[in-house]
Image (cartoon, rainbow, N blue to C red):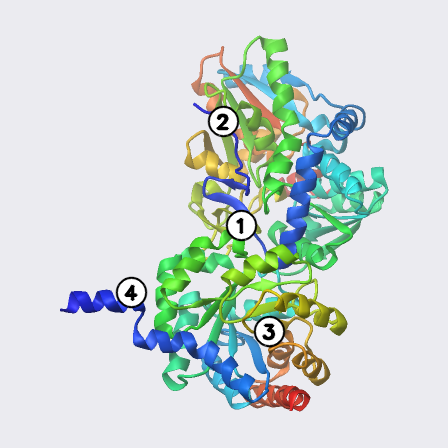
Amino acid sequence: MNAYDLPSKDGHFGPYGGIFVAETLVSALDDLRKQYEFYRDDPDFKNEFAYELKHYVGRPSPIYHAKRWSEHLGGAQILLKREDLNHTGAHKVNNTIGQALLARRMGKKRVIAETGAGQHGVASATVAARYGMECVVYMGSEDVKRQATNVYRMKLLGATVVPVESGSRTLKDALNEAMRDWVTNVENTFYIIGTVAGPHPYPMMVRDFQSIIGIEAKQQMMEDFNRQPDALIACVGGGSNAIGLFYPYIDNTDVRLIGVEAAGKGIDTNQHAATLTMGKPGVLHGNRTYLIQDAHGQIIETHSISAGLDYPGVGPEHAWLKDCGRAEYVAITDDEALEAFHMLCRFEGIMPALESSHALAYAAKYAPTLPKDKLLLVNLSGRGDKDMATVAQLSGLSL
Amino acid sequence: MPGFFDFIKDFFGEQSATHKTKRLANVFAALSKQNRKALIPFITAGDPSPGITVQLMHQLVKSGSDIIELGIPFSDPMADGPTIQRSSERALKHNVSLENVLDMVAEFRSVDANTPIVLMGYANPVEAMGYEIFAEKANQSGVDGVLIVDYPPEESHQWVQCLDQHQIDAIFLLSPTTPQTRVEQVAKLAKGYVYYVSLKGVTGASHLDLQDVSAMLNRLREHVSIPIGVGFGIRDEATAKAVAGLADAVVVGSRIIEEIEKSSESELLSNVGNLVSTLRSAIDDKTQ
């Protein structure tokens, strides 16, 4: 079998990916691709990226064996890749550092970003502050309400947060608005996309920056357990934390790759965000991929308890990994995710992000069906402090 | 020998289809003879309600439009500004689908056999219908050209082939950021006319630099032999007149949508008609 080498030169993962954008952006994307292809092999760039990940983000993030929770579940051992311990509290910063370093080399003094839960917005605002760049973050006004703390964090970091009032007022609309800004200001502005979606080279570039998660995991598993895990489990909205963990394992075919989508109130309702489970291929936000859409190709509003998973598309590489059978995708409801959130708090003293709680919830379902010597590595992609108000509200409390 | 006859028809294209393909070319040829420029208004199908679209199209023609760009409503119109997004949202409140849009064109075509119709929109509704079905239905409805904003030439190989087979012109965009090598590439694929986006940004923006447009059009004409329409940022008689002095066609979108937005139902046709007449006079004034 040939080693996995996607995307193709023109940015395709099988039938997915590509560059589906208006003419105004084509040359900007072409320039970005060329610059990225140069700098990704540039020793200076690589060294600076590695240095920042170590000294600014605090990498490597450890793998933690959740023994008490595993024992309670009574099956496979659950291991957690602790991306929640990164500076800013999630995996998002791995990518924003990479893109900010690239933006600096390209001479762009202004960065823009879209954000759902606010994690990518915070990570973008953080690196903009770190490197002295102007930062504008687009965020659906619905999400601004849901994630007030993160909005304030971004402002403290010096970013301008623009609430987006169009469409469903969530992540997809923030993305539309950021694209519009980029089209208008393409000469001085770098668009930091937060997930493995969008036009080529973004899905490839974001994956490469996030793949530090899987690269570390592979090494740590050998050091700590002398073997690789039986399965990797990660939540999938756009899918950047999942690809970051999966990518270095794609050729290790005896490791199962399991992506967990948001089933919201149930995939049989119309209130979910389980794109790969329930969607159909189409074109949105610059790439061909699975989308949650109606019979006429209009994008449908999604629902998830977790703002970071509340997106009607998914990275094109996930679409391909699903179709070719290398990865499996399952869906977890709001209630299941919430239960896992509480379990991890109580059994391990770790408060997970609601996004990551979806991956944990699937691990909690799956582990009891396996013998105790099996190892499940779950990507704990972010910490849950930002979600306290949401969780309190669901428990009938207000903070 | 019906089999052989069908083969000949398929091979050379049906007579009616051949005529249809020429609608765009005919309009530009006739205008060029008169030393006049084309006026191309844009409206979104189904805005503000599906019942009025065909009447509005006829009104546009009566008021001096040469070609109509008819927008396919989409939930996420990324390349458009707030005005055109709102028009899409109004149409989608009435669940206007791509199928409905094609029906509107067919209804228009049953009365007006000559005015070219160009559909403009985003990829996903076309993806959902399928290239082949879309192209066939569009041809039957009397569509002359299609511009899908997020199908750049790189991703359009099959798409253009499919439109070609059904005698529909693939219209492409060119922008101030398009490098010369891409202009050549687009020029090879484009049919009907090319649409030059006169400024960076989304539709409805308002800072048109005529000197830039003029310089760029000269650059484009080195490679582009078909007519060039200019759009984005044309908001009044003065800009329409100025652009008519440079380009082969003047495309006006957001300004017309604004007129639709602020008109009551009873005065909508006359208000839009008046606006288009004014633009027509401004354009002709420049070139006569």
C-alpha span from label 4 to label 1: 46 Å
Tag 3 residue? B229
Label 1 SS: loop
Q: Chain of mark 3?
A: B
Tag 2 residue? A257
Q: Chain of mark 4?
A: B
* Tag 4 and tag 3 share a subunit: yes
C-alpha span from label 2 to label 1: 24 Å
The residue positioned 57% from the left and 37% from the top of the image is A239
Answer whether residue A381 is visible to the viewer in this image.
no
Tell me if label 4 and label 3 are in contact, CB under 8 Å: no
Q: Quick one: A387 or A323, which is closer to the camera? A: A323
Q: Is residue B282 left or right of residue A274?
A: right
The residue furthest left is B1
* Tag 2 and tag 1 share a subunit: yes
**Label 4 or label 3, whichever comes before in sequence order:** 4
Give above or below for A371 relative to B18.
above
